[in-house]
Image (cartoon, rainbow, N blue to C red):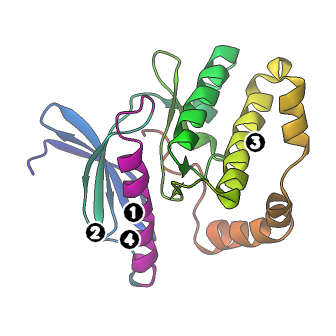
């Protein structure tokens, strides 16, 4: 596949992410082939989950278009915009649109599972929301009890961002959701997250916002 330009966005134990220009198109290439040998199986699984989610969400505004998916490589359309933690959106209209986007994703049977990261929320030039990085996403067509629990966590993470950038526009219902995290979420914060942060940041030197400048 001819390409005129490559820009490395991120390189870690799970492989490499580049922004490539292919003809007139700009695509994000997630490549698991450079992954560490002991992390390659996980890298392939993460790539597979993203490919599945993007295929299900095909043609949805605010979701990257899946261009090509192989066992160890995925290409998706580049979404022009700025990560949330850089754009710092204060307009309540952005969060209303983000809520509608998230509901569409959930209606199609997909939970993102990684929306605590501001870098996964994009503010487009039109000041509209977009979502990227579906490596941890889960597609569950029947949307059972576990799905609904995870979907609520997706929603709660969005509301946490709204509380950061647009706190005066939180509704009473939204404040109630924020104040009542699920039991799995509370257990994660008390036990799992400290271990996760130690392994990823201390041992592997990896941070959540790494590679977030171009998505």
Which label was assigned to residue 156? 3
Q: Is residue 117 above or below residue 190?
A: above
Residue 116: percent from the left, percent from the top? 68, 47
On-image quarter of the C terminus: top left
Tag 1 residue: 47
Task: Return the disc, 4 or 3, that comes first in the chain's sequence.
Answer: 4
Instruction: Kindly identify the residue that appears in the image at 77 percent across and 37 percent down.
Output: 160
* Alpha carbons under labels 2 and 4: distance apart: 7 Å
On the picture, is 202 further left or further right than 1? right
Mark toward the start of the polypeptide (1 vs 2): 1
Looking at the image, residue 130 sits to the left or right of residue 15; the answer is right
Residue topped by disc 2: 71
Q: Are marks 1 and 2 in contact (CB under 8 Å)?
A: yes
Find numbered disc 1 in the image and state the secondary structure of the residue it sits on.
helix
Query: Disc 2, disc 4: CB below 8 Å?
Result: yes
Q: Residue at x 60, y 57 (%)?
A: 207
Mark 3 vs 1, N-terminal side: 1
User: In the figure, is residue 23 to the left or right of 214?
Assistant: left
């Amino acid at each position: 596949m001819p390409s005129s330009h490559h820009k490395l966005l991120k390189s870690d134990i799970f492989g490499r992410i580049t922004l490539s220009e292919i003809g007139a198109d700009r695509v994000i290439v997630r490549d698991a082939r450079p992954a560490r040998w002991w992390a390659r199986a996980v890298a392939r699984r993460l790539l597979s989950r993203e490919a599945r989610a993007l295929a299900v969400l095909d043609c949805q505004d605010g979701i990257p278009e899946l261009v090509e998916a192989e066992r160890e490589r995925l290409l998706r359309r580049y979404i022009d915009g700025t990560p949330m933690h850089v754009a710092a959106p204060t307009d309540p209209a952005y969060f209303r649109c983000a809520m509608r986007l998230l509901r569409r994703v959930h209606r199609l049977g997909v939970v993102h599972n990684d929306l605590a990261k501001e870098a996964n929320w994009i503010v487009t030039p039109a000041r509209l929301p977009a979502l990227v990085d579906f490596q941890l996403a889960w597609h569950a067509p029947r949307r059972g009890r576990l799905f609904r629990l995870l979907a609520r966590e997706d929603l709660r993470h969005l509301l946490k961002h709204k509380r950061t950038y647009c706190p005066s526009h939180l509704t009473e219902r939204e404040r109630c959701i924020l104040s009542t995290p699920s039991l799995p979420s509370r257990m994660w914060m008390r036990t799992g997250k400290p271990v996760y942060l130690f392994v990823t940041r201390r041992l592997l030197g990896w941070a959540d916002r790494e590679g977030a400048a171009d998505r």
